[in-house]
Amino acid sequence: MGVPQIAIIGRPNVGKSSIFNWLAGRRIAIVDPTAGVTRDRVTHLIELRGRFAELVDTGGMGIHDVDNLTEEVEKQIATAVDSADVILFVVDVREGVTPLDQEVAKRLRYVQIPVIVAANKADHEKLDSHSYDFYRFGRKVIRVSAQQNRGKDELLEAIAEKLPAPDETPSTPEGPVMRVAIVGRRNTGKSTFVNTLVSAQRMIVSEVPGTTRDSVDVRFEMDGKAFLAIDTPGFRRAKSVATDVDFYSTHRAERSIRRADVVLLFFDAAERISKVDKQLCDYIAGQYKPCFFTVNKWDLMAGNLPTEKWVTYLRDTFRTFWFAPIAFITGQTGKNVKALLNHAWNLFQQSQERISTSQLNGLLRAAIDANPPAEHQGKRPKIYYAAQVAVQPPTIVLFCNEPRAVAPQYQRYLLGVFRERTPLSEVPIKLYLRRRQRDDSRDEIAGKLRGD
């Protein structure tokens, strides 16, 4: 499993960003008394009981954004809730239970993950009794004050207790099941492809764009491997989402990507790559999902266009996803479909690979020796060591003296080295930079890297 996520949720102006900064130990999120300052999700890596977790700050639930971005804010909140392993529901002790608090509690009532109520702004003991009303939500309530530094240890301990076990991964009695989402813009042949997979008319197939309006799961087996194919609605440009059906179709398709182990991004061989394709690829990349570029309906182009031209076209268009494999298939007849799925299974396995600490640090040392990081403000940053802390996606933490001094270009260089010299050649790698603590004893190669 990936790094567990702790989503900080609540109505506007209860101190979510203050809690986020407080737990992170540094000022990251903007703190302002004006409701609605936080819109996008803001994340930060923290360490609890010797393992890592990701804090996720979100916008206020129920805010009416002054720039007409309410739907986007709500979408970011929904994504955080869907991806979370623990939810921190922040409320304001001084104001007590408000109707909007009740609305947030209602939205969290049916989530299947632990929810902790953080009763914030309990600046002194006289305010502690004000938190009793929040027990009506049926959740564990912890009184805290980000401003006065009250209750931090208790809150972190409660979060640590609710995090999933490190080895807790979804499985079935029969063995692993690879969840593969088939996504793309409208009318690229996704449903026909699924029908071919299961050798049955499982999906409604139509030439009318947008026939599939919900995400549908179809389980099948091939060569002893179990797959769960997730057929999704075709994507449209945001300004073309004119109805509620379109809005929820897009939301469910994005949720399917988040659920998937591998994503097949479909293109129509007879059509040019569109802005929708680029937006979709960006979303997949943002979720760190292994992706297979799948050029469908290739039978219509055979003999007219060499595959090399499409490969070059894809590589030039999606430069940040240069490592994603490419397949040319005919979904209607099944040509090259089996090879595609076998390769997709390989991506699934790559995403679960663990690189030993010694191997990872050997690669890091060689990379730094060959190409040291550039100086920052007259000083060369020091990268002490690396550790892989999670899989799906493979997640690597670099411990250094100043994370901000390691340029993005150098981070991409190190990712390229890790990808080239480990089994992670075709999957996204999540990279964190973290400041090494003074009492950190995990410094086996620091002296060697410094040349001591």
Image (tube, rainbow, N blue to C red):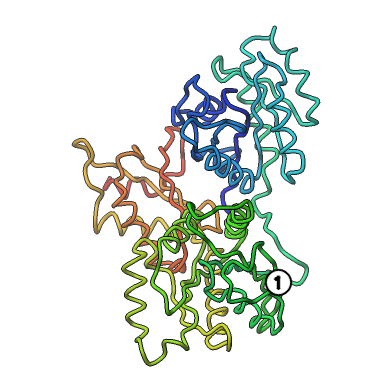
Residue 272 vs residue 61, the one in the foreground: 272
Q: Which residue is mark 1?
A: 218
Amino acid type, callout 1:
Val
Q: Residue furthest left?
A: 378
Q: Residue furthest bottom?
A: 303
Residue 322: x %, y % from top left: 37, 67
Residue found at x 67% / y 17%:
93
Q: Is residue 431 above or below residue 126?
A: below
Q: How many marks?
A: 1
Q: Quadrant of residue 314?
A: bottom left
Residue 15 vs residue 405, the one in the foreground: 15
Local crowd size for mark 1, using a 10 Å CA cut-off: few (<14), some (14–19), many (≥20): some
Q: Is residue 171 left or right of residue 342?
A: right
Pick the quarter of the image with the N terminus: bottom right
Residue found at x 52% / y 85%:
330
Pick the quarter of the image with the C terminus: top left
Q: Quadrant of residue 10?
A: top right
Residue 57 vs residue 307, the one in the foreground: 307
Q: Residue furthest top?
A: 126
Residue 3 seen? yes
Residue 346: x %, y % from top left: 54, 74
Q: Is residue 72 above or below residue 348?
A: above
Residue 43 seen? no
Q: Quadrant of residue 189?
A: bottom right
Residue 366: x %, y % from top left: 31, 59
Residue 267: x %, y % from top left: 47, 73
Helix, strand or loop at disc 1?
strand
